[in-house]
Structures are given as structure tokens and as C-alpha cells.
Amino acid sequence: MNGPAKYGALIYSNDINALAQFYVELFSMQVTRETESLISLVIDDFNIIIHTPPSVMPETEFNSVKLFLTVDNLENTKAKAIKFGGQAFDGVWSNPLFSVCNIADTDGNHIQIREFNQ
């Protein structure tokens, strides 16, 4: 896989090294990036990013596993999420490659949506 993944999961963990070792040993995933706060694992075209939890977040706004999916347009996807009974949250974060924001499905599971820059 070249460049950032379009699809995968974020997993928040208080022991990122132990959790990464679990996925490496059990599923033969490869470490593609490692910092103090995250470890990125990949197998085929699937990416798991194991990350230390963000600063204190209310339980209602935090899931330990969060899917990330690529969309064509963040704002259109946020509007559709609301239309279909989900939620859209404030805030968009960007890096040179893509922008991200968060939505929730009808069960309240958070999903990070990504829009790659053209």
C-alpha cells in the first residue's frame, strides 16, 4: 500500500505497543509507521491505526474503535448522515493529503470520514 489508506480502523488504546503486537502476531500485519502516540499497521489494503486516546473526552463522544472511510465530499456526506438518522459533528482537520471530520451512525458509533485533496 502506497500513501495513506482510504479505509481502515482507528483503535484507541492505553497500551499501543501491546495491542500492536497482538495484531502483528495474530494477523501478520506489518508496522508501517510508529510514533510515541500511534502505531500504523497494514495488511493488503486494510489499515489499523492504534492511537493513544485523545485528551479527556466524554464517554458519549468516544468509542475505542472507529472506522475511517474515504468519501468524495465531507459536507455532502455529513448532510446524508443526518438525513439517514445519524449525526455530524463540528470540526474539520486537515493535513497536506486529506481532510477529516467525524459523523456517527444510527447506533451512535463514530466514523471518521476522509476527503483526499485533488
Image (cartoon, rainbow, N blue to C red):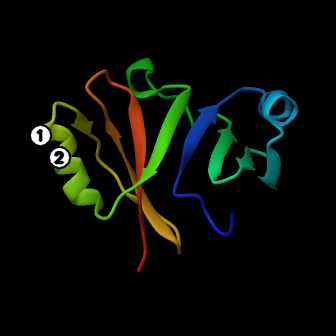
Secondary structure beneath disc 1? helix
Q: Residue at x 58, y 39 (%)?
A: 10
Front residue of 36 and 27: 27
Front residue of 75 and 26: 26
Instruction: Let me know if residue 104 appears in the view.
Output: yes
Q: Position of residue 75 (x, y in %)?
A: 23, 58
Quarter that holds the N terminus? bottom right
Mark 1 vs 2: CB contact within 8 A: yes
Q: Choose top left, top right, bottom left or bottom right for residue 49.
A: top right
Name the kind of residue labelled 1 in the image: Lys
Q: Position of residue 110 (x, y in %)?
A: 40, 33
Q: Residue at x 43, y 75 (%)?
A: 117
Front residue of 53 and 71: 71
Quarter that holds the C terminus? bottom left
Residue at the far left in the pictured view: 83
Residue, disc 1: 83
Residue, disc 2: 80
Vertical relation: 118 (above or below) 112: below
Q: Residue at x 77, y 33 (%)?
A: 16
